[in-house]
Image (tube, rainbow, N blue to C red):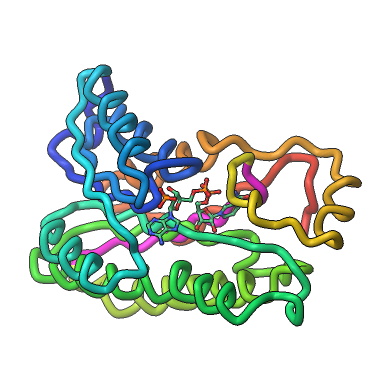
């Protein structure tokens, strides 16, 4: 095991699956103690077991990030973390007018309001201690419009803006703030996207998607830079995917 994050505690949201799971495992492999959160307890237990079997340290806190009482408890209990990876997110592709109002609200709450509220707790505690690293997992949709993804695009543009202002406000308090913007990654996030227009669009796709571990490598890179050095934004793209 590497020692680069030995002694540091990392809170990873959405750690039960996909990119978050890969981030939790990769940060643990660098010696960080992991607090893994998501709703699915069995999957979180599996992540913790995996880390412990490799000689690392981890625990999980299961709950719904759209439940403010849970978020506030998580924020208070995990206040002393050194690294926050705001990763949890959802996405349902469909034309805007075919997207239900419930789906719109759920995407905004999960992708934007939840990380804002959690970051309010954690970054506040980091600023008091004068150190810490907030890492936001945004998306290629933070900079370019994604067809059939109006609400998702809006939430990820907002995350990119939030990340920049958070850095402006807190870098003098000793915080690092980094945005990691992946292109398409092979995870289950698109499983809820069954609209025929989206299904038809996907049939023409031929390039290889990123693996969750590709994104986790960027997170580890950002988290292990020396004290005097930081990175504001890393875009990770499928090599043969859309280049804009
Ligand atoms: N996959 C891609 O192509 C891609 C590309 C760019 C950016 N991203 C971003 O990367 C992040 C992770 O995506 P992914 O592809 O890894 O998705 P994923 O495989 O579907 O995993 C999503 C994670 O978020 C958690 N989550 C969702 N809603 C939650 C809620 N209400 N409360 C607590 N946890 C919740 C899920 O856990 P539970 O279901 O157990 O709660 C799961 O751990 C998202 O922010 C996404 O926008 C993904």
Q: Is residue 229 above or below residue 70?
A: above
Answer whether residue 184 is magenta in the image.
yes
Q: Is residue 203 left or right of residue 58?
A: right
Q: Which quarter of the rendered picture does the C terminus lie within?
A: bottom right
Q: Is residue 96 left or right of residue 191?
A: right
Chain part drawn in magenta: 174-185
Q: Which quarter of the rendered picture does the N terminus lie within?
A: top left
Q: Residue at x 30, y 70 (%)?
A: 67
Q: Is residue 183 above or below residue 21?
A: below
Residue 198 is situated, as x and y percent measured from the top left of the image, at 81, 59
Residue 90 is situated, as x and y percent measured from the top left of the image, at 53, 60
Q: Is residue 203 above or below residue 144?
A: above
Residue 24 falls in which quadrant of the image?
top left
Residue 157 is situated, as x and y percent measured from the top left of the image, at 57, 74
Residue 140 is situated, as x and y percent measured from the top left of the image, at 64, 60
Q: Residue at x 28, y 44 (%)?
A: 36
Q: Is residue 119 above or below residue 33?
A: below
Residue 201 falls in which quadrant of the image?
bottom right
Q: Residue at x 83, y 53 (%)?
A: 199
Q: Is residue 119 left or right of residue 74?
A: right
Tally the numbered discs.
Answer: 0
Q: Is residue 86 left or right of residue 126?
A: right
Answer whether residue 176 is magenta in the image.
yes
Residue 125 falls in which quadrant of the image?
bottom left
Instruction: State the predominant SS element of the stretch in magenta.
Output: strand
Q: Residue at x 31, y 42 (%)?
A: 41
């Amino acid at each position: 095991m590497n020692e680069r994050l030995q002694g540091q505690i990392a809170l990873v949201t959405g750690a039960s699956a996909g990119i978050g799971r890969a981030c939790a495992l990769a940060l643990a492999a660098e010696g960080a103690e992991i607090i893994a959160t998501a709703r699915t307890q069995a999957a979180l237990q599996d992540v913790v077991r995996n880390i412990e079997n490799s000689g690392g340290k981890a625990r999980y806190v299961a709950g719904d990030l759209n439940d403010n009482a849970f978020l506030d408890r998580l924020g208070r209990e995990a206040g002393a973390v050194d690294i926050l990876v705001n990763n949890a997110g959802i996405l349902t592709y469909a034309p805007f007018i075919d997207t239900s109002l419930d789906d719109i609200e759920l995407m905004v709450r999960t992708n934007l309001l939840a990380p804002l509220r959690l970051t309010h707790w954690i970054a506040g505690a980091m600023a008091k201690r004068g150190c810490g690293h907030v890492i936001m997992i945004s998306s290629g949709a933070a900079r370019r419009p994604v067809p059939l993804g109006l609400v998702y695009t809006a939430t990820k543009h907002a995350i990119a803006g939030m990340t920049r202002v958070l850095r402006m406000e807190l870098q003098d308090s000793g915080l690092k703030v980094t945005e990691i913007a992946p292109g398409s990654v092979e995870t289950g996030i698109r499983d809820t996207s069954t609209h025929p227009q989206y299904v038809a669009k996907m049939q023409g796709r031929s390039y290889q998607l990123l693996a969750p571990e590709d994104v986790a490598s960027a997170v580890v890179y950002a988290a292990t830079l020396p004290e005097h050095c930081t990175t504001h934004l890393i875009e990770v793209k499928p090599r043969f995917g859309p280049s804009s």
